[in-house]
Amino acid sequence: MPTAFGVGEDATRGFMYTPVILPRQRILSAFVPFVEMCGVVVVLLLLTQGILPLLLHGSADVEHPESGMPLERIAYWCYYAFTMVLVVLRPRDFVRCAAKAPFPAGMVLLALLSASWSLDPNETLRRAFALGMATAFGLCVASRFRSHDLLRLVACVLGICALLSVAFGLLLPSYGIASGVFSGDWEGVFTHKNTLGAMMLIAVVTFRSVPNVSRRSQLVGWIGVGVAAILVVLSRSMTALVVLGAVGLVMPLLRRFRQGRLMSALVLLAVSVLCATVIFMSVDRGVTLRMMGRDATLTGRTGIWSAVVDRIIERPLLGYGYGAFWRQIGGPGERVRQVVQWPTPDAHNSYLDFGADLGLVGVLALIGVLAHAGQRVWRHWRPALGTTGDWFLAFVIVIVLIDFTVSFLYGSFFAWAMLVTMTAATPDGGPSPSTSVAFLKSC
């Protein structure tokens, strides 16, 4: 029988119904995924903590207000609303991805429960809510994009950060280059040089992994690698430089090991260890560190770590509550600042930061998150199948290493959301996207 949307016969008569999509429906079906994808890009840019915090607060050398400004609150509430819309639109996909990432969900639950013993329950609930939203956003991204499209999208976001960092450094040096303690170090669109170093380190491994489907994409990828690497050097973040070198060594080793070339992997490892040992033993440790632009205390980090450990020992099992340790006034972090005589915002070590907030249970939970992510990535990694698996594995390695001297995972919801996404997604697979792949490739 005729219908408003197509022609067909009653099912009881054995005829098949053939629907017809009206032009308005075609426009809507194309417009909604485009808006959704643009929203994901904007949220990822927001989570990088670039541009907006720098313009509002300035460099990390400037004392930040305790709470965010109204514009920041509005931006984050828009991001929360967008994430909830994504969850509501596709609840089954969200639940399916959440089932693949139980450890991040467990960390969120632990953070929420810590409000019951926190020194500052309100701050703990606020931070736990933000952690939960970052986790939900990561799961939504994993459910919406195939790994190759996700790789291109993240490359777009990091490419924007890299280009704007160059522009800020050259055209707006009062914003893009630090003054005061870290005078001359590039910060780009971020509030601290270590943040620029960490983000550009992620950019290097991301651009290096973008599939080279054409000479143009290959050229763009190598240009991205070069620009990001130069920004890592200009940031003078020694942690980012060392981790970049470590990833450059570890990835070939793992690739040879995965391909069954065990002897080749062992020879490469032995040569690398031998060279590092000779260099370290032939030059005094203090001289070596000074040549690298750092002192033997790793720019004061060892003093911070010692003071934080002293505070952790006082509440070793469950900590002081998520986000409560480093609160501005009256927290145990204030005692650490008094000891080191420096207004450090964190421990410069994510493992210690989670230990201070959530105790030994929190550290074990964090190790569980990283181990589960690494196990899933390693299980699906097939070097011969393409480069997306390399990106997943390199990202996990970067996160594990860089967080020993930078509180990247603890302080960056971008890093946390991407880790959740890679835990729930599958390299070189996953659900088919409804987004415009052509638009992603053009980025």
Image (cartoon, helix red, strand yellow):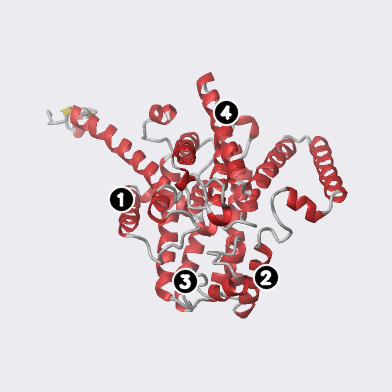
- Quickly name the residue at label 3: 328
Quarter of the image for residue 433 reads top left
- Counting residues from the start of the chain, the first of labels 2 and 1 encountered is 1
Q: Quadrant of the N terminus?
A: top left
Mark 4 and mark 1: span between their CA atoms?
36 Å
Residue 228 in picture, x, y percent from top left: 56, 37
Residue 356 place in picture, x, y as percent? 57, 71
- Decide which of 368, 360 is in the foreground and name it: 360
- Which residue has dot 4 on it? 222
Amino acid bearing label 4: Trp
Residue drawn at point x = 64 percent, y = 34 percent:
383
Q: Quadrant of residue 353?
A: bottom right
Q: Secondary structure at mark 2?
A: helix
Q: In this rendering, does residue 7 appear at all?
A: yes
- Residues marked 2 and 4 touching at CB (< 8 Å): no
Q: Label 3 sits on what residue type?
A: Gln
Camera-nearest label, 3 or 4: 3
Alpha-carbon span between mark 2 and mark 3 = 20 Å
Q: Is residue 340 above or below residue 330?
A: above
Give left or right: position of 415 versus 381. Answer: left
SS category of the residue bearing label 1: helix
Alpha carbon separation for disc pair 3 and 4: 43 Å
The residue that mark 2 highlights is 306
| Mark carried by residue 85 | 1
Please state the horizontal and vertical placement of residue 410, each as a whole percent of the image: 53, 59
The CA distance from mark 1 to mark 3 is: 34 Å
Q: Separation of disc 2 and disc 4 at Cα?
A: 41 Å
Q: Earlier in the sequence, mark 3 or mark 4?
A: 4
Task: Assign a secondary structure to mark 3.
Answer: loop
Which of the image's four quarters has the C terminus?
top left
Mark 1 is surrounded, within 10 Å at the Cα level, by few (under 14), some (14 to 19) or many (20 or more) other residues, namely few
